[in-house]
């Protein structure tokens, strides 16, 4: 089900969905993102990406030979300094308008559309420093209504909070 859509600053369009990804679309999963809540679900962990000069959820590209869950766990530690284990998939971002775009770090050509899988979990850990991801300088928990969180990301947070009510 389509929940939200928009465009990033670079003009690339995206859609945020909940539900199951079809088998045909599974091959186009390129990244994993994790929404890490505090145990009371009032705060969310964000990392500061120095390349994009913005706060964002920990996440990133899936490495060759790596599964989606493994990528989410790795990225949570590299970018957020948090060790996580229990993950719940609650949605995905469908990224469009990038056919033929080359990923400069891997040399792979992005499919169209590509998919970023979203997970949610909770943690009472504080970020461990130094962060191992070069593009992230710090990680911090923010109140979920903090103005630093984009309106698009607030929709994703609300969706994650809705899915916490559904048993695993």
Image (cartoon, rainbow, N blue to C red):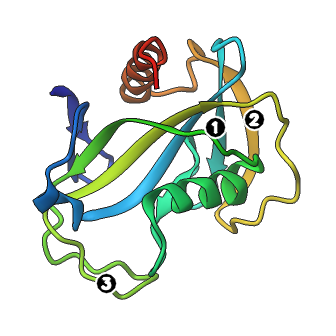
Q: Secondary structure at mark 2?
A: strand
Q: What residue is rendered at 61% in x and 39% in y? A: 86
Point out the residue furthest to the right here.
Answer: 129
The CA distance from mark 2 to mark 3 is 32 Å
Question: In the depicted view, which residue is nearer to us: 159 or 68?
Answer: 68
In the image: residue 23, left or right of residue 54 = left
Earlier sequence position, callout 1 versus callout 2 = 1
When asked about the image quadrant of residue 10, the answer is bottom left
Give the quarter of the figure containing the N terminus: top left
Question: In the depicted view, which residue is nearer to us: 61 or 39?
Answer: 39
Q: What residue is rendered at 33% in x and 47% in y? A: 9
Reply above or below: 23 against 161: below
Question: In the depicted view, which residue is nearer to us: 43 or 166?
Answer: 166
For disc 3, the neighbor class at 10 Å (few under 14, some 14 to 19, many from 20) is few
Q: Which residue is mark 2?
A: 140
Reply above or below: 91 against 109: above
Q: Which residue is mark 3?
A: 108
Reply above or below: 17 against 65: above
Q: Which mark is residue 142?
A: none
Q: Secondary structure at mark 1?
A: strand
Dots 1 and 2: beta carbons under 8 Å? yes
Is residue 52 shown to the viewer in this render? no
Earlier sequence position, callout 1 versus callout 3 = 1
In the image: residue 145, left or right of residue 115 = right
The CA distance from mark 1 to mark 3 is 27 Å
Point out the residue furthest to the bottom here.
Answer: 107
Q: Which mark is residue 46?
A: 1
Horizontal and vertical percent position of residue 163? 41, 19
When asked about the image quadrant of residue 50, the answer is bottom right
The CA distance from mark 1 to mark 2 is 6 Å
Earlier sequence position, callout 2 versus callout 3 = 3
């Amino acid at each position: 089900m389509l929940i939200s859509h928009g465009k990033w600053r670079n003009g690339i369009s995206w859609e945020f969905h909940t539900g199951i990804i079809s088998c045909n679309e599974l091959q186009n999963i390129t990244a994993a993102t994790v929404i890490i809540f505090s145990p009371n679900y009032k705060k969310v962990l964000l990392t500061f990406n120095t390349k994009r000069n913005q706060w964002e959820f920990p996440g990133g590209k899936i490495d060759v030979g790596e599964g989606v869950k493994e990528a989410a766990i790795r990225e949570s530690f590299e970018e957020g300094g948090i060790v996580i284990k229990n993950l719940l998939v609650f949605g995905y971002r469908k990224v469009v308008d990038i056919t033929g775009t080359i990923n400069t770090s891997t040399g792979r050509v992005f499919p169209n559309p590509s998919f970023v899988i979203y997970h949610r979990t909770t943690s009472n850990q504080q970020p461990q420093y130094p962060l191992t991801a070069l593009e992230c300088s710090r990680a911090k928990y923010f109140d979920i209504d903090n103005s630093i969180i984009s309106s698009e990301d607030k929709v994703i947070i609300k969706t994650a909070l809705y899915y916490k009510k559904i048993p695993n």
